[in-house]
Amino acid sequence: MVAKSFTMLNKAIHYAITALSVLLAGGRAAESYLQLPVLMQWAGRFHLLLLHFPIVLVLLLAGLIWFRPDVVKVEWLGGIAVIALVAALSGLFLSLQEKDGGSLLAQHKWAGAFTAFLCVGAYAGWNYLFKQKSLQRIFTIVLSLSVIITGHWGGTLTHGREFLAYPGADKTFTDLADDPLIYAQLVQPILQKRCISCHSEEKKKGGLLLTSYEALRKGGKNGTLFDTGNWHNSLLLKRLELPLAHKEHMPPQSKPQLSEQELAIIRLWLAKGASDTLAFRHLPPGDTLALLVNTIIQAGQSDRWAHLPKIKDETISGLGNYFCTIQRLSANSQALSVQLYAHPDFSAKDLERLLPLAKNTIELDLSGLPLDEKALGVVARFKALERLEIDRTPVTDAGLALLKELPDIRVLKAYQTKLTDKSLSTLKQWKKLQRVYAWQTGISPATLGKIYIDTGADTSIHFKAILSKPEILEPRAFFDQPFALKLFHRIKGIDIRYTLDGRTPTSTSTLLGRDSIILIDKPVKVKYIAIKEGWESSQADSIELWRTSPPPPVTKLIHPPNDSYKGRGVASLFDHKKASLEYSDTLWLGFREQPMIMEASWPAPVSLSSVTLSTLFSVDSYIFPPTVVEVWGGNSAGSLKRIGLLKPDMPGKSMMPANRFYTCEVSSSPIRYLRVIARPIPTLPGWHPGKGDKGWVFVDEVVVVTR
């Protein structure tokens, strides 16, 4: 009986292997013509679940063949071959749904098929081909390498080439000089870290390459990535700023996301025209991007200088004099900046007396000094130098060659010197060199790899710095007494213009007065903008302000909010606190299964003017406006009649999360009892990913205004 069972099992394995082998071989041969049915497309999605099992089994098989071939049974080989073939087939089905896999995906598929067929070969030829131990060893090595290479290529497809990098090296910006190129040294590293895994020559998803500036400008199947005329509408920015759950958000939700700093760099670079020649020096003082880049530079410098030996203030002050200024580069930093000034008796001895500072001197300014070869020989002993200034000196190519052993030079200022192109060989030896200022020298205006040769002003950059938005001192959304709304800007000399009629402010709108306040005594939406001559005005911003009456003395909720979004119950609806756009904010009350029904009462009749609901709208989180807002009132709880009705418009699928206020104007005789109802959308629309599911309504405040 057992023997018969094994015979049936062998037959089943044999038929399965034959069928799967034919299917895999045929699929690989004709994959460009294949149109998969939905069932097979769905089966392909299980590839990532199936592949781990055969990897373990195949490696276990290889180990057994190497160490204990005598215990290996042909049924084991057949079972492993079947599993390997299924994994390879599911991978093939999945790959046919990826139109832009690139060369890496093709390599991964061929390697997967090769591994599966190796397992088939082991099953088919075990009794004939593996009698010799040497042949067994060769097969084991080939099989193990095939599994490892296939798995490595698959992991690279999923996680990118940097996934196996040592975590300590996972830093976006490295070795920034004091004047970095914004694209090459800030934007491109972000793309390399966050985007290249899906947009390289090996995996050109969406037909988009992000490996070079030229490819970035070209864009992909969905069009160009940025619009220099209207940077706010750039496709690159839109995809990055979509809600995380949105299917078009980039990077995908499963991938590491851009930090706020990285997103700000790309946004501000686009605002400056998305140039590949824009440098830090082009940015005016106080510019938002300039401040951000400076912060990154300083952070990188602090890391680089952490190893410097401690040096006492007494040592610094003792070596300084009228012709020598020595300063720490930042408070408590061991990194020093040294500047020498010309005097009649200047010689190499002036530099020699500073050698006790050689291990700490990061910046050395020798501009205008009569430097000879002996003096340059002393400079060569300042091994920590990162920035060297020898402007307006008699330094020649031979003199500069004396400094070629300095390991950390990043910036060389050498304008109005006798240097020529012969010095390029020296510059190439400075592996960390990033920029050379070479105006009025014999050095050609060229770029040597990452070394930028600056031979004069760059007239190709023309833009106005963009102002940041005005800020509000002590912002609020609700008020019960007239108050002064105070706006301010951190840059002096800024004009703040505003409107109260809903129009977008311009340079001709009302100018904020010297006291920087706007008197608010009624519900209003204030829109404001920052303007300054020579700068591009800020984006317009706004705040909605709602006047409230004292809350009803008695309030309750008929249905409790969802346990995950319950705030402080009904008290949250009358605390005059505004929630953020994050649905996880604890000020929100969320309702899904039941409508929000709030009831209130007063000891004596009151006349109502309006009832306003402050709500959240977030399509990707299934949070929609209420389908209907009803206001009921009366003099007893059992005799209420509807005194207000509002049916908000439903949103489109491309709308961003927002805070929405819905106001019901009511006209009624005095009442003592009030009921407010907000009904969630019963089924999500057909265009929504969760179509047919129930929606949410989120409320954080109910504003009841009495006459």
Image (cartoon, grey):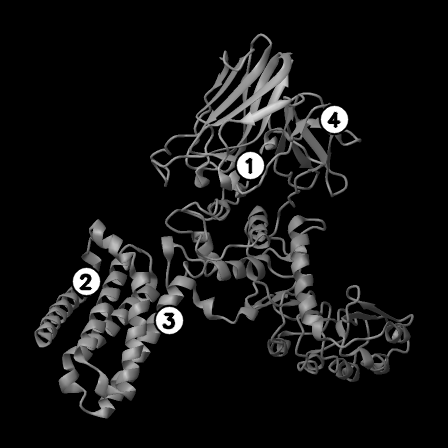
Residue drawn at x 81%, y 81% as measured from the top left:
355
At mark 3, the secondary structure is helix
- Which is more toward the observer, 679 or 499? 679
The amino acid beneath tag 4 is Phe
Label at residue 483: 4
**Disc 4 + disc 2, Cβ < 8 Å:** no
- Which is more toward the observer, 258 or 703? 703
- Which is more toward the observer, 584 or 415? 584
Residue 332 image position (x, y, % from top left): 79, 67
> For the residues marked 1 and 4, what is the alpha-carbon distance in whole angstroms?
26 Å
Residue 493 image position (x, y, % from top left): 76, 39
Q: Quadrant of the C terminus?
A: top right
In the picture, residue 452 is in which quadrant? bottom right
Sequence order check, earlier mark of 1 and 2: 2
**Disc 3 + disc 1, Cβ < 8 Å:** no
- Neighbor class of circle 4 (other Cα within 10 Å; few <14, some 14-19, many 20+) is few
Sequence order check, earlier mark of 3 and 4: 3
> For the residues marked 4 and 2, what is the alpha-carbon distance in whole angstroms?
73 Å
Residue drawn at x 55%, y 39% as measured from the top left:
581
The amino acid beneath tag 3 is His
**Disc 1 + disc 4, Cβ < 8 Å:** no
> For the residues marked 2 and 3, what is the alpha-carbon distance in whole angstroms?
23 Å
Determine which residue is flagged by label 1. 588
Sequence order check, earlier mark of 1 and 4: 4
Determine which residue is flagged by label 2. 27
* 496 left or right, relative to 191: right
* 535 left or right, relative to 255: right
Label at residue 484: none
Kindly tell me whether residue 229 is visible in this rendering: no
Determine which residue is flagged by label 3. 152
> For the residues marked 3 and 1, what is the alpha-carbon distance in whole angstroms?
46 Å
